[in-house]
Image (tube, rainbow, N blue to C red):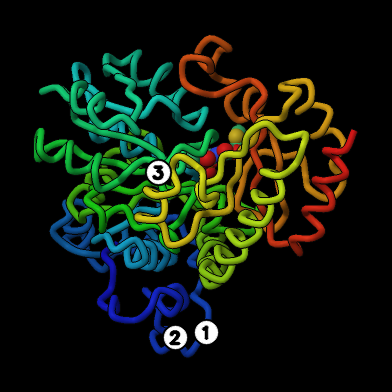
Amino acid sequence: MSSDNNNKLSFATRSVHAGYDSADNEGSLNPPIYMTSTFAFDSVEQGAGRFSGEQQGHFYSRISNPTQEILETRLANLEEGEAALATASGMGAITATLWTLVGPGDQILVDETLYGCTFSFMEHGLKKFGVDICYADFTNHAEVQSKLTDKTKVVYFETPVNPNMRVIDIAAISALAKDYSGDIKVIVDNTYCTPALQRPITMGADLVVHSATKYLGGHGDLIAGAVVGDAETIQQIRLFGLKDMTGAVIAPMTVFLILRGIKTLQLRMERHYQNAQAIAEMLEQHPAVDQVFFPGLKNDPWHTVAAKQMDGFGGMIALELKGGHEAAVRTLNKLKLAKLAVSLGDAETLIQHPASMTHSVYTAEERAEHGISEGLVRISAGLEAVEDIIADLEQALAD
Ligand code: 3LM
């Protein structure tokens, strides 16, 4: 649903208030959870009008629901898009969006490194239906430019990239795509940053997708997703990608939990990135560590572009240990406080091994081609006291 008109208020205020007024709901400070699959019509004419889109209003919760509408309004507002659609998972948002925008013969130009299941959907899913998936290193703008064709319908990337922490210049890539053709949709997966740290639509992107499972929910207790963009495209995704192609509908209780999570989004993101900065600085000095990938480090190759487009360097870190894969396994098995788990953006520090976990859907050869090394370790810095996280990492890294 469309964003409401309170963009003048600051981000933190809009995170708490946008899309909901207690005065509309008997003073209830928190929104009602509409547990309903269907909506009764006053007349056949009204029902027909809602189905045809000539009349506003809900008719079935696979398409929309009043609780979901509050979250959609809030997300659209925070991402500075016109409208949003909340979905059952991040993959639900990504698949509903791409099923809507491409067909056989079309090309999607994507960055060479993607979250594992997004890669699988493109490589093993869309390709089977005749969509051409073309990879480029999006940090190399000349390469991106050379790969745009008249068949390119979508340009798609994450930034920072899951899992190797490259940072892609959103404004530069959006401008390249738009200069080639105004019809190309630029889609940015903003899961790693959330709108608290980065708002791709304000930099020229058309659509933003999210795994709301991560920082937006923020507490590791739900699976959800969202897509934000212009009202017309979001409506197309709702009425085709969601309604007919995926059915990836978000549950009202999950919406409630995300709305609760978003109230503290900015506070949490600040703590996540402060903790990540301190952890990355410790790792950079540690004798067992070969390389640290974190854009907040001054000598990170992506520091300048990250500083330009992000309001904080985020809570995610990647690293290589000197002993490679074997050292990574040994270290991860020694963790005591940090949890050995996939996912990210939770209160708990989560550490995982992408090659055998989140990016195991790539073959070993594909990982080598797509810039995901076998020894890479990924850290999602949690909200614990940073000295406790650091002490745990130091004991795990010790011989
Ligand atoms: C992970 N990622 O640990 P859901 N986009 C990005 C993501 O990181 C993810 C999705 C979309 C992880 C999940 S791996 C089995 C666990 C950048 C998810 C997909 O459908 O809500 O999981 O979002 O990196």
Give, as a three-letter code, the residue at label 2. Ser
Q: Residue furthest top?
A: 365
The quarter of the image holding the C terminus is top right
Q: Which residue is drawn at the image coordinates 22% and 22% (left, top)?
A: 107
- Distance between the alpha carbons at the discs numbered 1 and 2: 5 Å
Residue depth check, mark 3 versus mark 1: number of the one nearer the observer = 3
| Cα distance between the residues tagged 2 and 3 | 32 Å
Q: Which mark is residue 81?
A: none
Q: Give the secondary structure at mark 1.
A: loop
Q: Position of residue 59 (x, y in %)?
A: 32, 57
Q: Residues within 10 Å of mark 3 (few under 14, many from 20)?
A: many
The residue that mark 2 highlights is: 22
Query: Circle 3 sits in a helix, a strand or a loop, which is it?
Result: strand
Q: In the picture, residue 19 is in which quadrant?
A: bottom left
Q: Is the shortest distance between ligand 1 and the CB of mark 3 under 8 Å?
A: yes
Quick one: label 2 or label 3, which is nearer the N terminus?
Answer: 2
Whether the residues at callouts 1 and 2 have beta carbons within 8 Å, the answer is yes
Q: Residues within 10 Å of mark 1 (few under 14, many from 20)?
A: few
| Amino acid type, mark 3 | Asp
Badge number at residue 29? 1
Quadrant of residue 187 within the rendered picture: top left
Q: Nearer the viewer, residue 351 or 95?
A: 351
Q: Going by the image, does 219 lie left or right of 300?
A: right
Q: Residue at x 87, y 46 (%)?
A: 336
Residue marked by disc 3: 189
The residue lying at 45 percent from left, 72 percent from top is 15
